[in-house]
Amino acid sequence: MTFRVFIVFCGFIIVLCFVNESNALKENDRGVCVIRKSTTQRRSRTYTASRWCGGRRCYFKKTKLMKPTIKWTNQTVCCLDWIYNVKRDSCDPVCSAGCPTCDTPGTCSCTINPEHLGQCFPKTCDRPCIGSICKNNSCECLPKHQKYNSTHCVLCDAGFTLDSQMVCKPLCEIECVNATCTAPNTCSCHQGYHNKNGTCEPACSKKCINSACVAPNKCDCLDGYIRVNSTYCRPECAGCSNGVCVAPNNCLCKEGYSRVSGKCQPVCPTACQNATCVSPNKCDCLNGYIPLNSTHCQPECTKCTNGVCVAPNNCSCNEGFSLVSGECKPVCSSTCSNATCVAPDTCACLNGYTRINSTHCRPECRNCHNGVCVAPNNCFCNEGFSKVSGECKPVCSSMCSNATCVAPDTCACLNGYTRINSSHCRPECRHCLNGVCVAPNRCSCNEGFSRVSDECKPVCSSMCINATCVAPDKCACLNGYTRINSTHCRPECRNCLNGFCVAPNNCSCNEGFSRVSGECKPVCSSTCINATCVAPDTCTCLNGYTRINSTHCRPECRNCLNGVCVAPNNCSCNEGFSRVSDECKPVCSSMCSNATCVAPDKCACLNGYTRINSTHCRPECRNCLSGICVAPNKCSCNEGFSRVNDDCKSVCSSTCINATCVALDTCACLNGYTRINSTHCRPECTKCTNGVCVAPGKCSCNDGFSLIDGECRSVCRNCENGVCSKGNVCLCNESFEMHNGTCRRKCGHHDCGQENTVSGDHLGKNNTVIRQRTRLVYNKKRCRGKTNSGSCVITESYVSIEKSQSCKTGWIYEAKTDSCVPKCTSGCVNGTCEAPEVCTCLEPLVLRRGHCVEPTCSPACDSYSSCTDFNVCTCVNNTIALNGSQCAPVCPDGYYNDPVECSPRCERCVNGTCTEPGLCTCDPGYKNIDDVCVPKCLDCRNGECVAPNDCLCHDNYAMSNGTCAPVCRRACTNGACSEPDKCTCDDGYRLSPEDPFVCLPVCSERCVNSHCSSPNTCTCFKDYERNDTNSNVCYKKCDGACENGRCSLDGACECDSGYILSNGTCIRNNTACSANCSAGGEECGLGSGCPSEQTHFPAEVTSAGLAGLQISWLLGGAVGLLLLTLLLVVIHRTWRRRLELEKKIKEDQASPGNYSVMCSNPNRLLQTQPGDVTRGYSDDLLPTDETELTYEVPLRDESY
């Protein structure tokens, strides 16, 4: 309890400390500065001292104060011009009065009026002007201010100028060399420099020899000298390697050398041949030469084997060799493969290669078993192997335990180990029963066992009856016996399942079983077909067979769909199927094109294809009316068409007039129009004689005609006995003539007088010749008498002027139409003579040798085209040409040509029919799931419905009674196969731990001297009887009465305490045991009772126990009081710290001079005071860059 209280208080204190610290200002927050504070600490050390107290030495503890130490710590406070905000626990900037929004110290969100501080200018510039005035949307610096950027101007004192960091720095008119301008026109020398005549010159502590002091303690050599050390330089001479340089470029030659061309050259009395005199009387061979004697050299060739060196690195090769890359290489007429030509026509294998023939070598690899040698010692491992220590070792996906990976995914146990599973092995030991085999033939006996005769023998304190000690104090029955209790065993029989063991290996079979070959075999009244009798009248199918009824089983085959299983895994395919890849696949006599054979002579189209006929499918494409669909949704446009906006559009070189471009340079006339030529079509009108057809069914009549009842007719007055012709001219019928504007019957010879005609012709319209005739008529009625010749005497005459018309050449007059029509010599039967000798046949006739005949086409044209010329089919209206010759109707949206009929379009319609655009109606036996037609099966659990009511069972399942039932390798005894190779026991049975296909009966209480023959039913062993009070216990009667004892379950008499068995009778043990009995004991010796009286004393409560309890309570109270005191101290310090912090903030605001801060406001000057300086950072007001600023604060010992 005390410990728990202590833990709770400690946790509370930690939480308070965390909350207190979490309210501190953060170092990187806006307006937060860091100051350093120091605290003096004095530590004490406790040590043990001793002194003599009378006649003995006393030890005691002493405390020694150590030397005080100063500890520096950092503290966060609000910077100058920032004020602490208690509510937000943060620092806020301070601005002058009247500032609406203070962004940073001294900077408002508006422009400050420099003439009236605290007031804002109206914002007329995009950015506020600092030290400047906004004019014309730009900032102009105030007088004597220097421009920093587009918005900031700074006022510097005289002699100061503004730098890039917006700081006023002193200005020196003369540049300060090796110095800093510390005041106007005042240079202060840098460290290491001294002022000499107004110039800062470097100072060197040591004298510079042959050099000049150019920087503090740095000497630079004079011209003509080179450095030896930091202060000394020696003269430098060119070409003075064999002389002494006494001054710059002044060389004194050594003995044996002479000055030649400004250099000290050695002197050799004998001329050097192919060499150079390099020292007195010493020749050094030229490059490419080697010494022959002291004065002569011969040429040297680096690689001139098999040749003669005639000049430096100029080798003349011997016969059979040629110069290659500066070497005489042998020449081989045949190319050396993986070898080098080492002599003329002689190949030597490369290192790591071995010879195949005279010119070819193959790579050699060590330990390249299970691999292919691709290069010397470069073995490419076979699949399932990987390179390990230069060898192709097999790879096992599971790590081999106590085994070696000898082949891909194959582990071989180490010597002395035996396999547990495919990857694990355990050590093998002989005679390691009751022990643990820790290594091959190394057995570690279990606790309670000892090594005897190289075996772990258990140790038992009590003797085992008909048993052997197999574990500490544990007996194992002898062969032929089974346990009754911890020390007794009963006889045991082998193969006594379904029977009773009456003696060792003497089994009496249960009812329904008989002894066959030493086993109790079940008896089945009916013969088991393809099955084994496993229980009375119970048959279990053989391996590879499945049950049909209680006695019959049929063979089982995997993948025997569309076949008959004639034996286990022996499938005979049905007619129309053949065995392919261990499956009965359907056979199609004709090859399926773009389809799969799914049933005998039945092809199913692949995805994206649609059926053409029983064996062929064609790909499906969207918008492929004028193209060929070469793959699903892949359209190849016909010649003369191009792909535009995912559609094949036709291409015509000439514009189609009153027509549409439907193929390459092919125009199809619009509805109501007929073809004139390949690109022009004219409108069609049923009756448009004496007019012009201007639109389909719309006739515009010629001049002098008007539209009457759909025909252009002439309008004439008083035209009886005549026909009104063109131009409203009345032409009289035969036997009539025009007289005074009317048609009158002609006069006979004696009725009419003479007629004299004067004619004159001129050209008129409509291919006519207008003829004017003046006729003098002598009317009989006006004859007053006759002359001698019988002629009339003219008594009155008159002149009649008539106009008539006649046709041009090649035209003839047609009385029916009263017009000139062209003349065709052939007669133009079944046609129209459009012009002289130009005959246009009526549709569908064509002109052949001047006659209109009906054209014939072979092959015949389909229903969407007509034979317009011999062997020429032309698409009719509202149709288009496919593939250049085939015509098809123009399908509406959602339909396509299939191949010439308009069929609705569906994206996916396998096993169904597309009845409407986007609507797939499934075939019988199929159902629509997610717009896909899938086959329907009545019950296809644990299988896949591959065709209507055709279920293909999954692996380890077989068809049974119309459903896919799980398959177990053996029949489930007293249970049912619920999953593949898994039995579910019937009620009252449990699965045998030894046989997963056998269910054993379960008895709620343990059967003693009996076996559980059925659920909650125990059957006694032979010669045993059932206990009347407990049905699950069977016992064997004792031979005798067993007085003073009890009859055990196996019929043995066990004597009571104090009695011993003698000749089958329990008698009292009279052996004296006083010496063996202890005071208060109950038994002794062989079990004789010892008289004793037992005295019990009550427990005493000692004073020590009470004292311990009191100390525990006192200790707990002291700890609690200590924690409470600590809590009060923490709360007090926290409160005091906050009060002092608020007080300090007020002091800082009242006396800003205690700190020196460089503000970001350009209008404020830098103020400094003496004191220790720490570096801090503040935010810059400028939007263009960031400026590092410093502030100085005095260091203090006290803490806030």
Image (tube, helix red, strand yellow):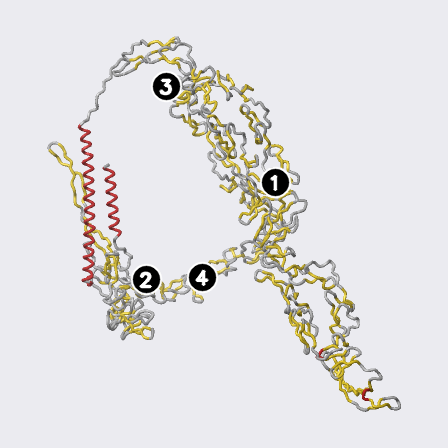
Tag 4: amino acid: Pro
Please name the residue shown 80% across and 81% down the image: 746
Q: Which of pointers 3 and 2 lies earlier in the amino acid sequence?
A: 2
Pointer 2 residue: 232
Q: Nearer the viewer, mark 3 or mark 2?
A: 3
Q: Which of pointers 1 and 2 lies earlier in the amino acid sequence?
A: 2
| Discs 3, 2 touching: Cβ within 8 Å | no
| Discs 1, 2 touching: Cβ within 8 Å | no
| Discs 4, 2 touching: Cβ within 8 Å | no
Tag 2: amino acid: Tyr
Nearer-the-camera pick, 606 or 705: 705
Q: Position of residue 291 (x, y in %)?
A: 51, 55
| Discs 4, 1 touching: Cβ within 8 Å | no
Q: Nearer the viewer, mark 4 or mark 1?
A: 1
Tag 1: amino acid: Ser
Q: Nearer the viewer, mark 4 or mark 2?
A: 2
Badge 3 element: loop
Give the Cα separation between the discs numbered 3 and 2.
Answer: 104 Å
| Residue 192 in view of the camera | no
Pointer 3 residue: 461
Pointer 1 residue: 581
Tag 3: amino acid: Ser
Q: Nearer the viewer, mark 1 or mark 3?
A: 1
Badge 1 element: loop
Q: Position of residue 308 (x, y in %)?
A: 58, 55
Badge 2 element: loop
Please name the residue shown 87% across and 88% down the image: 790
Quadrant of res 197: bottom left
Give the Cα separation between the discs numbered 1 and 2.
Answer: 97 Å
